[in-house]
Image (cartoon, helix red, strand yellow):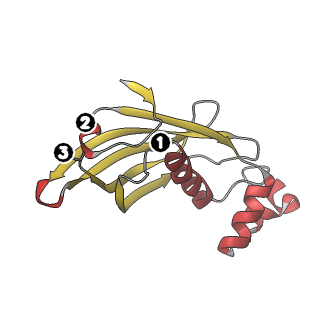
Amino acid sequence: MTETKTGGLFLEDFTVGRTLVGPSRTITEADIAAFAAVSGDYNPLHVDEAFAKNTMFGQRIAHGLLGLSIATGLAFQAGLVDSSTLAFTGLTWKFKAPILIGDSISYRATVAKNRPLPSQGSGMVFLDVDLVNQNGVVVQTGQWSMLIKSRPTA
């Protein structure tokens, strides 16, 4: 089942196979400039239009880590990782295709594993996450692991 996620989720809500689709965001030149300033990554592939025209992409592309950062922001905005998330514990991530200026990206997260830790009132959740552009192309993919609170008992 695929659904749009809004609002907080507890451990028990992360059933294996459940797929959540997040909101989208359009990548702008300002996003790339701001990320370059924050990260210190001024690679000309991202910030120099004349240089980037002569690359395999033919234009500037967003930083790969900007895509990942926006994916986590979209997940937060949708409530996927809100106050019920105790810790983002790890990730594996692959960069599959460029993110271009003007691309609108969103995430699709499928619960791969849910491991309750009853003595801690929480559990580990493993999500298979795809970052997808407006054409349905997976531009980035990987797995996130998070420590999530269990639903409070009455």
Residue at image mark 1: 130
Q: Could you give the CA–CA distance between mark 3 and mark 2, rounded to whole angstroms?
A: 22 Å
Image disc number at residue 66: none
Location of residue 4 with respect to 60 vertically, above or below: above
Q: Position of residue 2 (x, y in %)?
A: 41, 26
**Closer to the eye: label 3 or 2:** 3
Q: Amino acid at mark 3?
A: Thr
Residue 137 occupies quadrant:
top right
Q: Residue furthest top?
A: 1
- Quadrant of image for the N terminus: top left
**Closer to the eye: label 1 or 2:** 2
Q: Amino acid at mark 1?
A: Asp
Q: Are marks 1 and 2 in contact (CB under 8 Å)?
A: no
Label 1's element? strand
Label 3's element? loop
The tag earlier along the polypeptide, 1 or 3, is 1
Q: Are marks 3 and 2 in contact (CB under 8 Å)?
A: no
- Quadrant of image for the C terminus: top left
Query: What's the residue at 45%, 39% (across, down)?
Result: 7
Q: Residue furthest left?
A: 119
Q: Residues within 10 Å of mark 1 (few under 14, many from 20)?
A: many
Q: Position of residue 132 (x, y in %)?
A: 56, 38
Image disc number at residue 153: 3
**Closer to the eye: label 1 or 3:** 3
Q: Which sits in the foreground, 84 or 14?
A: 84
* In this picture, residue 16 sits left or right of residue 86: left
Location of residue 78 with respect to 122 vertically, above or below: above
